[in-house]
Image (spheres, coloured by chain):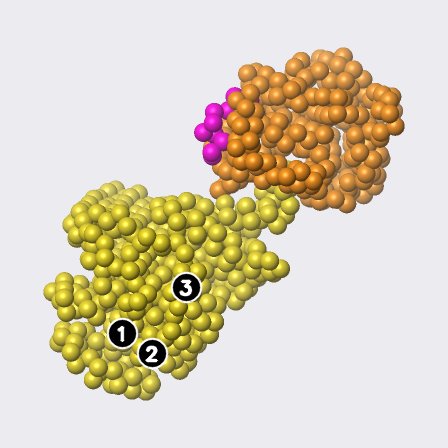
Amino acid sequence: MEQGTGNREQGGAPPLLEVRGLRVSVDDNEILQGLDLTVNAGEVHAIMGPNGSGKSTLANVIAGRPGYTVTGGEVLFEGRSVLAMPADERARAGVFLALQYPIELPGIRNREFLRTALDAIRESRGEAKIAIRDFNKLLEAKAQELGFEADMLKRNVNEGFSGGEKKRNEVLQLAVLEPKLALLDETDSGLDIDALKIVSEGVNRFRGPNKAIVLVTHYQRILNYITPDVVHVLIGGRIVRSGGRELALELESRGYDWLRDEVGQPA
Amino acid sequence: MTQTLTKYPRYEALFSALRPARNDEPAWLAELRAGGFKRFQLLGFPVERRGNEEWKYTNIKPIAEAAFEYPRGAGDAALAAINERLPFDSGMTRVVFVDGHFVEALSATATEGVTVMPLSKAIQKHEAIVQKHLGQYARASDGAFAALNAALFADGAFVLADNATRTPVHLMYATTTAGSMTYPRTLVVAGPTSELTLIETYVSLTDGNHFTDAVTEIVLEDGARVDHYRLLLENDAAYQVGQVRVSQGRDTHYGGLVYETGGGLARLDMETLFGDTGSYADLRGLYITSGDQHIDNMISIDHAKPHNTSRLIYKGILDGRSSAVFGGTVFVRPGADKTDSHQEDKNLLLSHEAEVDSKPALEIYADDVKAGHGATAGAITDEALFYLQSRGIDEFTAMQLIVRGFASQITDTVAVQSLRAWLEQHTLEALPRFRAGGAG
């Protein structure tokens, strides 16, 4: 299978993310059946595919969500195997997952949640905790960019937030925590065009030569705002085709069946 | 029906032995005590649990069978020790009872708008008021423990509010003597349109076992407002059975918050009564148990009259092999139309062995009534833990955030800033798993 643009020379540094032959089951159902993916720093990869193909599973397994059984293969982050690491260790190493369905955290304030997380990440890098005043300034600035009013930060995490606000909150967390690898799990689902623009702008501000983004999406619409370097199609638990943006447009107009037929997958 | 007098020779001997010291007490009080003791002999300790709905989940045999000593005076308690244990009351009016007896040296009274003194003194200085109210709400007929308290109480706090008092009044009942039993008696009368914040604390200054049988009566006369915080902080070997009776007049507001992290076996029997219209009862509770603790909260809200509102929300955090009971009953009597009530009991179970029995109940005999109830019990969800961990927060810290977040629905309602901060801190410390090197 043709893979990404993994030819970019990084001065010998390993790819930011390498998934090799990953096999994952949920409750005895094999979802990922030997998935390969290489993502270098500075790249944006889009993962598309029909429902149930394993897109969210991929993002969740890389982030370390419990409930999945890895039955084969490897996931390397900055050259290190992460499958044995608990989710918090991966996050401190620089992996971030924007959840598909962010939940409310009763009694935990947005502000405190984010500062605790940021401090944990900073401390693991040998840095001191952030001064509260500096944090508040940082948070308010990022929040404003994402269309949040200051008093929303006082609320409990996602309490009373609409679907769109929850997704924007995921991108706010991304902006504050500044990971190396952002896994965006259907961050565009359920968003109206205005929210989509705000979220996309936030993601684009995050982009940089040292960062990478894996954007899991069901619709090509978000790719109008976040230009991917590579588009992968996940069918039957494997990446069956990779290409440029045109691939996304083709999927949009033709659906997935043509590709399923080509690679011999059942519908 | 034959009324058998159950035999409790130790209690009978004690009651007789106390009589001489009480010769100065007025006749009405002697009668109250005698009636209480007789009722106790009639009822006996509620050790028969089968068929006894009220005591179904709580076994008080250890209390009935133990031989506790009745302290004749206060044991030694250092001011420094008290300040260390309960640091939230600086600047407050404080009345301290040690082993059931008033200790002036540890107290700090004198506040405007409110009269605070030991009951033993109030019986002389404010006899008419005390006589009018004492034992009228927590009657001996309520049960053996209320009856025994009437018979055996040595002292307690008397609070009479005339005006709006900003400074909270802190009633502290401390035990220093292991193997002892005390019967704290509290009487609070909030006069018309008065405002009072009251903190009532039960604390052990010994690690040994002891028994507290406490009765608190609170009367809100028309237009009065009382914010009441009852903190049960006794040790894991202590037994407590508490009774709180609140009587609300017209247009009153009673805010009651019960916070329990001790003792080993505790039961609170709380009742509020709407005696008129236009009032609000806002009852909140937070119980935190671990190890082998058992805490039983029985709450009853009596909408005896129309046009009153009640809210009852209790939350429990259970760990180890501990257990809790919640029994909430809202009575809406005939004619109590336009009642608005809601009750909830929510529990967070941190271990597989912890158990909660939650029974909200409604008895509605009126029309045009709003009454809802709910009860939940669940563990910390994988989703919540993962969300926090996926942001770099380790599991231990994540659990602390979730537990504190769960408690915050109750602790956020504490209007006294110093107390709120202390409760938030104490909530995590109460759980061994969050103490250094602890396990649950």
Q: Secondary structure at mark 2?
A: loop
Q: Secondary structure at mark 3?
A: helix
Counting every numbered tag in the picture gives 3
Task: State the residue at coordinates (28%, 69%).
Answer: B102
Please name the residue that numbered disc 1 is placed on: B154
Chain A color in figure: orange
Q: Are marks 3 and 1 on the same chain?
A: yes
Relative height, residue B366 to residue A266 (above, below): below
Image quadrant holding the N terminus of chain A, namely top right
| Residue B337 appears in the rendering | no
Q: Are marks 1 and 2 on the same chain?
A: yes
Mark identifier at residue B71: 2
Query: Of callouts 3 and 1, which one flags the residue occurring earlier in the amino acid sequence?
Result: 3
Disc 3 to disc 1, C-alpha distance? 25 Å
Chain B color in figure: yellow
Residue B173 in magenta?
no
For badge 2, the amino acid type reads Pro
Disc 2 to disc 3, C-alpha distance? 22 Å
Task: State the residue at coordinates (50%, 38%).
Answer: A109
From the top left corner, tell me how far across and down residue A104 is, in percent.
Answer: 53, 37
Disc 1 to disc 2, C-alpha distance? 9 Å
For badge 3, the amino acid type reads Ala
Foreground disc of the pair 2, 3: 3
From the top left corner, tell me how far across and down residue B133 is, in percent.
Answer: 17, 63
Q: Which chain is disc 3 placed on?
A: B
Residue range of the region highlighted in magenta in the rendering? A146-155
Question: Where is residue B76, by image quadrant?
Answer: bottom left
Query: Of callouts 1 and 2, which one flags the residue occurring earlier in the amino acid sequence?
Result: 2
Relative height, residue B261 to residue B388 (above, below): below
Task: State the residue at coordinates (19%, 68%).
Answer: B121
Q: Secondary structure at mark 1?
A: loop
Please name the residue that numbered disc 3 is placed on: B80
